[in-house]
Image (cartoon, grey):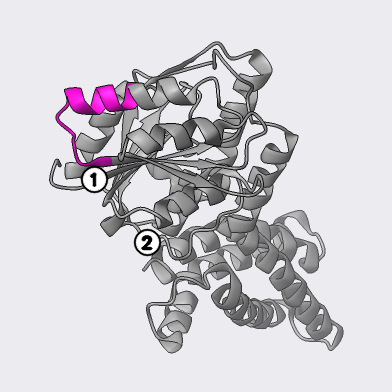
Amino acid sequence: MSYDKVSIIIPTYNEAENIKDLINNIESTLKKNNINNYEIVVVDDNSPDKTYEIVKEISKANNHVKLIKRERKAGLSSAVLEGINNTDGNIIVVMDADFQHPPELIPKLIENLKDHDISIASRYVKGGKIEGFSLPRKIISKGATLIAKILVPEVNKTSDPMSGFFAFKRSSIDLKKVNSIGYKILFEILYRNPKSKSIDVPYTFKDRIKGKSKLGTKEILEFLFHAIKNSRIIKFAIVGALGTAVNLGIMYLLLNRGMFYDYASAIAIESSILFNFILNDKWTFSDKKGRKIISRLLRYNLMVGPSGVTIFFVMEIITKLLKIYPLIGQFIGIIFGFIVNFLLSYTKVWNI
């Protein structure tokens, strides 16, 4: 893809020990692979060790190197986005400055963009590995990846959604809605571009030799908050919990008025279905509204029908076989119905 300009974005904070060697290494690698149309954009958050001064001096003699100095430390994701917004390359490569991301892999990441939108350096695909990490650090890394995959299904297209080393085609990725909160921008890009085509490239992630890791409690908490905030499963569960209150509340009122529990159950189920649709449409899937609302409503009723049937029959079986109060049977049925409801809603109603 030599006809496309390559923009390599490197966010930095206290990387004075690494940045010069890294830039030299990147340029050497690019030239060996006949990649001559490129720029290296260093986005520095006013590093106390004056990383920006080193980059500034390099840029005076090398027009391939560009410095963006920010006044304060504002996070990796926002640094990456600022770098992207100040470049004109169609091929964007994002990497750290600590040599944990080997520059030698850049040509391979770029090459894979011939047939894919995003090319991701992965520690967890076959052939990839992590070296030099302590057990707690490995647990944090694996745990963050697992949480991301469970809470946000859109990132499951890669084995390493928490990777900080990747490349993508600007023309194929929508960055308008990408949130700059957090320290893992790839997670956000994958979430906002669920139809993008990605590929994993194995590599060995090594512990840094110089400098200190930027991963701390703040960054971990930011990621957890970001994952929860973007999790449709959690939003769907909250809506489901509110819908459960509506369901049980209506059934309780109808039972107290003497209505037979079969009829009360059916009315309560349909009422909660309508309630859940409105809230999910306005909140959980607010960014996925390609169809008209009437179409979405009809599809929702059709697709969650199996969920309603699940709730009804679980309630019937438990109530009649175990001889327990119908309201308890209804609640247990709702738990089973939730799984069916989410899967069908995600894949059939708001799947555009």
Quadrant (top left/top right/bottom left/bottom right) for the C terminus: bottom left
Magenta span has 35? yes
From the viewer's side, name the closer residue of 71 and 92. 71
Residue carrying label 2: 174
Q: Which mark is residue 116?
A: 1
Q: Which residues are magenta?
A: 25-38
Residue 164 seen in this snapshot: no
- Can you say whether 92 is above or below 329 in the image? above
Q: Residue furthest right?
A: 256
From the viewer's side, name the closer residue of 151 and 127. 127
- Bin the neighbour count of mark 1 within 10 Å (Cα to Cα): few under 14, some 14-19, many 20 and up: some
Left or right: residue 303 versus residue 14 is: left
- Identify residue type, mark 2: Asp
Q: Check disc 1 and report its element: helix, strand or loop.
A: loop
- The percent coordinates of residue 226 (x first, y second) are 63, 51
Q: What residue is shown at x 71% (from left), y 61% (from top)? A: 320
Magenta span has 127? no
Quadrant of residue 258 within the rendered picture: bottom right
- Identify residue type, mark 1: His
Q: Check disc 2 and report its element: helix, strand or loop.
A: loop
